[in-house]
Amino acid sequence: MPITFRKSFRILPGVRININRRSWSVTLGGKNGPHYTRSSTGQRTTSWDLPGPFGWRSSRSRRRTGE
């Protein structure tokens, strides 16, 4: 079983900084409604928690250029 690390800090109401072994990210949004996340790896995620076991998520990764 691998050892994992994850820590989340609330810096303002509706703003969180998330840190793990490989990257960090900033999440904007409250408990209800949409959440917008930008990662240090270039990934952008928009998610929305819906009532019950439902939810919606859309992710977009950074495109590599110059290869």
Image (tube, rainbow, N blue to C red):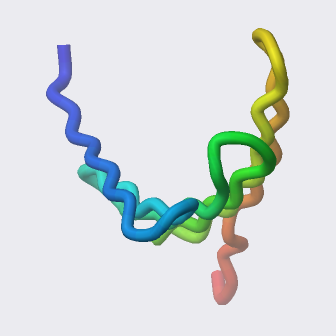
Report x, y in % for residue 30: 64, 51
**Up-down relation of residue 16 to residue 59 (above or below):** below
In the visual, does 31 lie left or right of 47? left
Residue at 59% over, 67% down:
38
Q: How many circles with numbers are drawn on the protein?
A: 0
In the visual, does 20 lie left or right of 41? left
Q: Quadrant of the C terminus?
A: bottom right
Report x, y in % for residue 20: 29, 50
**Up-down relation of residue 47 to residue 11 (above or below):** above
Q: Quadrant of the N terminus?
A: top left
Residue at 32% over, 57% down:
9
Report x, y in % for residue 60: 76, 58
Name the quadrant containing residue 2. top left
**Up-down relation of residue 32 to residue 25 (above or below):** above
Name the quadrant containing residue 28. bottom right
Name the quadrant containing residue 14. bottom right
Residue at 27% over, 47% down:
7
In the visual, does 54 lie left or right of 64? right
Residue at 51% over, 63% down:
13
Report x, y in % for residue 35: 70, 52
Q: Residue furthest toward the front?
A: 13
